[in-house]
Amino acid sequence: MMYALSTDASHLEDDADIYDVHLIEFEGFEDVSFFEPGIDAQRQQGAPAVIEFVGNLERIAGRDHLLAAPLGWLLLSRRMVRVLEAVGPFRHRLVPTVIYSERISHLVRKGYPQRRTWHSVTDPSLKNEDFVILQLLERTDCLDRERTLVKGVPFHQCGEEFLGQEDAEPLVLRPPPGGFPPVFSVPELLYYCYTEEARQACDQAGLKGLWWRPQP
């Protein structure tokens, strides 16, 4: 079984913001990608060395997977990355982040569009540096284009170039030599895939905030 991973939003109230953190925008942020394996966003797209956010630190405490606005970037805890690395090797880059308490949002971002101010945050209780953006550095060419069906039509005949989490039924992947890494990127999929072993390791480690979506 393969899984897509989403953020578990069951802790939110009905009228709550579905995003855990909000990006402190920087020049050109709309064009920055951490999904393409061949793009180094800091070197090639002008992204900051550390990506900064604002969020409710109490709400995210103890969680391991966050959803960020406005681009839907997925943030993993460093603890979760260590769990995945213990399952097996996979080539990746970790983009560091810092999340400031929303109580000081007015101090760390101003203007329209809002940009980071020069205000320095030294109090550790007002920031969280435990999360990273995980970027895989290679893709696994493993999609079975004949047996993967989209509305009953083989993928190679359906006219689609990419697939979202619920577009294929079934999604059929061919194991590469040596087997799948715990988390991997498929060229035709708009999300990362996680193996059963990865899911079990995360569950056994007691990680929080993960919603595993089985891929049929």
Image (cartoon, rainbow, N blue to C red):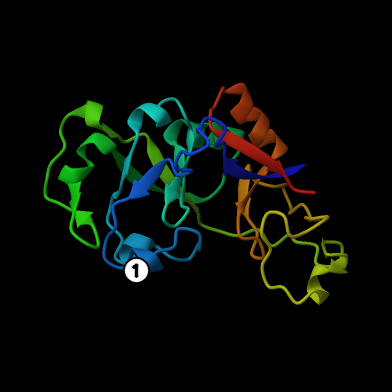
Q: Is residue 169 above or below residue 124?
A: below
Q: Is residue 55 above or below residue 116?
A: above
Front position in the image: 158 or 197 = 158
Residue depicted at 48% across the width and 33% down the height = 64
Front position in the image: 57 or 132 = 57
Image location (x, y in percent) of residue 53: 31, 46
Q: Is residue 1 above or below residue 144?
A: above
Residue depicted at 23% across the width and 42% down the height = 105
Residue depicted at 13% across the width and 41% down the height = 120
Q: Which residue is mark 1?
A: 44
Quadrant of res 165? bottom right
Front position in the image: 175 or 74 = 74
Number of numbered callouts drawn: 1
Front position in the image: 140 or 109 = 109
CA neighbours of label 1 inside 10 A, class few (<14), some (14 to 19), many (20+): few
Image location (x, y in percent) of residue 111: 18, 58
Q: Secondary structure at mark 1?
A: helix
Q: Amino acid at mark 1?
A: Gln
Image location (x, y in percent) of residue 185: 61, 56
Q: Is residue 11 above or below residue 152?
A: above
